[in-house]
Image: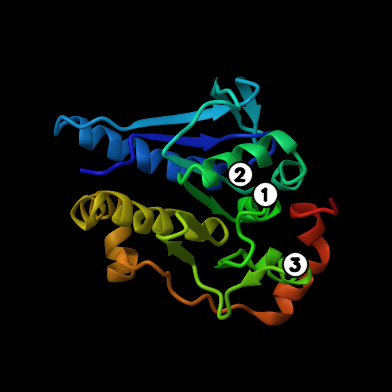
Amino acid sequence: MSDIKKVLFLAFPNAGEQDLLAPWELFKALAYDLSGQGETLEVTLGSFEGGTVTTHMGAQLQTEKVSPQDRYDLLYIPGGIGGGAASRDPQILDFIRAHHEEGRWVAANCAGVGVVFRSGILDGTRFQAAAVLGRRLRELGADVAEPRRAWSLLPDAKIFTAGGAATVHPSTIALVTHLFGEDRARALAATWDTLPLHGEALFNPEGPVSHDDETFVKGLQDGMEKVFLPEN
């Protein structure tokens, strides 16, 4: 039985739809399966403002209002264009730090990794990042893994980092594997067609190597890296 009983997917203005909703949906599906076995997993799509949060493509999501004093066993920070503003939001950064300092799990994908980096909890830790942020993070002193992988799970630090939107679904299966066991993760992956596509790599603590087109990535970074992670 897992120690993870409460999970928060933290929404903020201009969060990425896939980055936020794909892992939230998988965890909601897991919660449903667990309920049939007499176990409880509380999965919250929340924000500090509560109510409607508009994503970076304009979808309007209804979120539960959460307090900076609330605590969860797993805090998930998504990416999206809004990650830039979130990386300068003291309330979000303090919330991340508090969870880490209290020995709780912190997970992030895409630009959410930049938000977590700005909180300071990744100092001295090698982690994964989306292609658009790799150069910027290294310039800021981060230890970004090379070669870049789709995800990385650090059990001792209770930190999980993943790349851009395409990594979000498989990386969530990897996270579920560690937190809830391979049997449950395998059933979830098979149900959602993730297993036939990605295979056994889903159950590893590190994801597959990402094969970047260096020329394209440089152009992406030149145009977008300071949008996703602006100056402090």
Q: Position of residue 67 (x, y in %)?
A: 58, 23
Q: Earlier in the sequence, mark 1 or mark 3?
A: 1
Task: Say which element carries label 3.
Answer: helix
Which residue, as the protein is rendered here, is positioned at the far right?
A: 231
Task: Name the residue type under label 1.
Answer: Ser
For mark 1, what is the residue? 119
Q: Say which mark, if any, is on residue 97.
A: 2
Residue occupying the point 37% across, 66% down? 205
How many numbered callouts? 3
Q: Earlier in the sequence, mark 1 or mark 2?
A: 2
Residue occupying the point 47% across, 64% down? 151
Task: Say which element carries label 2.
Answer: helix
Res. 31 in view? yes
For mark 3, what is the residue? 220
Between 102 and 87, which is closer to the camera in this rendering?
Answer: 102
User: Pointers 1 and 2 in contact (CB under 8 A)?
Assistant: yes
Q: Position of residue 169 (x, y in %)?
A: 42, 54
Residue occupying the point 75% across, 47% down? 84
Q: Position of residue 132 (x, y in %)?
A: 69, 65
In the rendered image of this protein, does residue 6 appear above or below residue 163? above
Task: Name the residue type under label 2.
Answer: Arg
Task: Name the residue type under label 3.
Answer: Leu
Q: Is residue 212 left or right of residue 9?
A: right
Q: Colour scheme of this structure image?
A: rainbow
